[in-house]
Amino acid sequence: EVQLVESGGGLVQAGGSLRLSCAASGFGFDDYVIGWFRHAPGKEREGVACISNRDGSTYYADSVKGRFTISGDKGKSTVYLEMNSLKLEDTAVYYCAASRRGGVPVGEPSYDYWGQGTQVTVSS
């Protein structure tokens, strides 16, 4: 059974940090791209960052460049999203997803498996 389980969300003050984890199982982790998406109230879900487990290539949305860092631990089949200098507009449910596509796909249709999400709330 394919599983993607997010953890690490919570309530943090603006300017603070959180680290999200995405634990994967049930598929060939090393052959997949793992992406983080977020869905804020009243907005469309957007891609935040992704990492290719094949070659380590990464992608970041402009809105998080320089603040968020994505990394992976193949031994633990886990991908992390380190979020620093958090802003109010980072408040959202964060999802991780897995894609077998090549490169670092950023569109939702490219992703085959999805987790249930973890809430991140940034307060002033």
Image: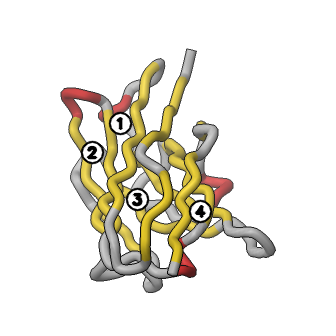
User: Which residue is tagged 2?
Assistant: 54
Q: Name the residue under label 4.
A: 38
Residue 113 lies left or right of residue 62; in this view the side is right
Question: Looking at the picture, how far across and down is residue 34, in whole percent?
Answer: 42, 47
> For the residues marked 4 and 3, what is the alpha-carbon distance in whole angstroms?
12 Å
Numbered label attached to residue 50? 3
Q: Spatial distance from mark 4 to mark 1, Cα to Cα?
A: 23 Å
Picture residue at 58% right of the left edge, 53% below the top: 119
| In the displayed structure image, the side of residue 32 where residue 30 appears, left or right | left
Quadrant of residue 89 in the image?
bottom right
Q: Do the residues labelled 2 and 4 touch (CB within 8 Å)?
A: no
Please state which amino acid type lies under the numbered disc 1.
Asp
Q: Which structural element holds mark 4?
A: strand
Whole-number angstrom distance, CA of label 2 to CA of label 4: 24 Å
The amino acid sitting under disc 3 is: Cys
Instruction: Give coordinates of residue 13: x percent, y percent.
Output: 43, 72
Q: Badges 2 and 1: C-beta atoms under 8 Å apart? A: yes
Q: Which residue appears at 49% of the width and 49% of the height?
A: 101
Q: Name the residue under label 1.
A: 31
* Sequence-first disc among 4 and 3: 4
**Which dot, 4 or 1, sits closer to the camera?**
4
Amino acid type of the residue that numbered disc 2 sits on in the rendered structure: Arg
Q: Whole-Å distance between the Cαs marked 3 and 2?
A: 12 Å
